Amino acid sequence: MRRYSLLLTIRGAYQKDAAFCADRGQAGLAEREGMIVKKMLFIYNPNAGTGTLKPRLSDVIDIFTKAGYEVTAYPTQKYHDGTEKMETCSDGYDLIGCSGGDGTLDEVVTGMRMRAYKAPLGYIPAGTTNDFASSLGIPKDILAAADTAVNGVPFPCDVGTFNNDYFIYIAAFGLFTDVSYETKQSMKNILGHLAYVLEGAKRIFNIPSYKIRVIHDGEEIEDEFIYGMVTNSRSVGGFTGIIGTDVVFDDGEFEVTLIKTPKNPLELNELLGAIMLRQINPERMYSFKSGCIQFESTEAIPWTLDGEYGGSHEEVTVRNNRQALQIMVRQEVAAGLAAEKMAEEAAEIDGAAEG
């Protein structure tokens, strides 16, 4: 019986090797016959989220390969490694793949923007919150997202410049903005999104206030704020609809929300309640759209960019780089992300109202 099992094992190994050699032979034949072989660089964070990518990594690369890509896979080893890899990789890739949380996505896109890399980006969300992927309708399922990365359609998405840095969907200061990068990875892996909530609860009685002058589109605002965010997303911190429902991703403008400092704990409680109910209170908040915003303060204010620490600054200039990134999305959701589609729907509503 042991000898028979060994023969089966050897036969199975031989069949796998034969199939592998056949595949390699077909690939070589394709190259000899002049067929185009597409190349893909896949950068992934093996420690992101709860490690959901690791057990599916082989299946993910198989999806890429079946779509006609020769895949180079690179697991990030340290903070900012995604940026460094993009800065040093060759120019010959037809598609950049990325998997991890919002921070990993930020690193890869930052590297792409620093060297003006033109290849489209396919993103597989594997972090704790994945705000940007949720906003773009990228599937939460690992394999479905991998399929979208190689078989979806490229969507021209805006990217933000923050002084000399970049961000994808949010630059923010103040209330709870340090929660995402100060929450331990081990807590995120065990508790998921609840880890952010628990970490944020520690800060509820220690909220800083900043006096800031905000300049945009020829207007100036000077006030004291506990929170401010510049966004290009329909989801922030796992909550959808806080910014509004008319968010598009290719219009060259960001959504800006600034929350005034409350005078007492009662006002703070009312303010937090309004935020959770997706209500903009014009007496307590400023809300507007702009493609360029300047922030000036007399003290260095810590900022977060896509959930990662963005440094402390007295002066900040945020600019929208319209349609600077081609990101792969599902064909059926692409139109709903665009400014053109939003304008068409608004015109239809106006026409129906007039009729």
Image: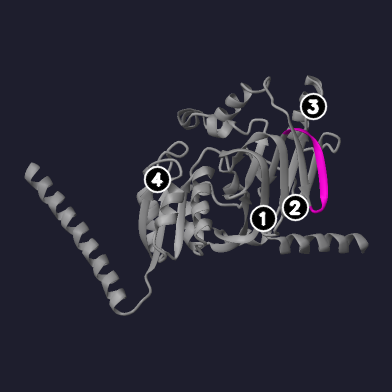
Residue 283 pos. (x, y %) = 86, 35
Q: Are marks 4 and 3 in contact (CB under 8 Å)?
A: no
Q: Are marks 2 and 4 in contact (CB under 8 Å)?
A: no
Q: Residue at x 68, y 60 (%)?
A: 338
Q: For mark 4, what is the residue? A: 76
Assess disc 1: are there few (<14), some (14-19) or many (≥20) residues with their C-alpha within 10 Å of its C-alpha. Answer: many
Residue that lies at the very extreme toward the bottom in this rendered image:
33
> In this picture, which residue range is highlighted in magenta?
217-226
Badge nearest the viewer, 4 or 1: 1
Q: For mark 1, what is the residue? A: 320
Sequence-wise, the earlier of marks 4 and 3 is 4
Q: Residue at x 73, y 28 (%)?
A: 209
Between residues 134 and 72, which one lies in front from this camera angle?
72
As shown in the figure, which amino acid type bears the numbered disc 1?
A: Asn
Q: Are marks 1 and 2 in contact (CB under 8 Å)?
A: yes
Q: For mark 2, what is the residue? A: 290
Sequence-wise, the earlier of marks 2 and 4 is 4
Distance in Å between CA atoms under marks 4 and 1: 28 Å
Distance in Å between CA atoms under marks 1 and 3: 30 Å
- Quarter of the figure with residue 186: top left
In the drawing, does residue 198 fall left or right of residue 117? Answer: right
As shown in the figure, which amino acid type bears the numbered disc 2?
A: Ser
Image quadrant in which the N terminus is located = top left
Check disc 2 and report its element: helix, strand or loop. strand
Q: For mark 3, what is the residue? A: 262
| Overall secondary structure of the magenta section | strand
Check disc 3 and report its element: helix, strand or loop. loop
Residue 321 pos. (x, y %) = 64, 58
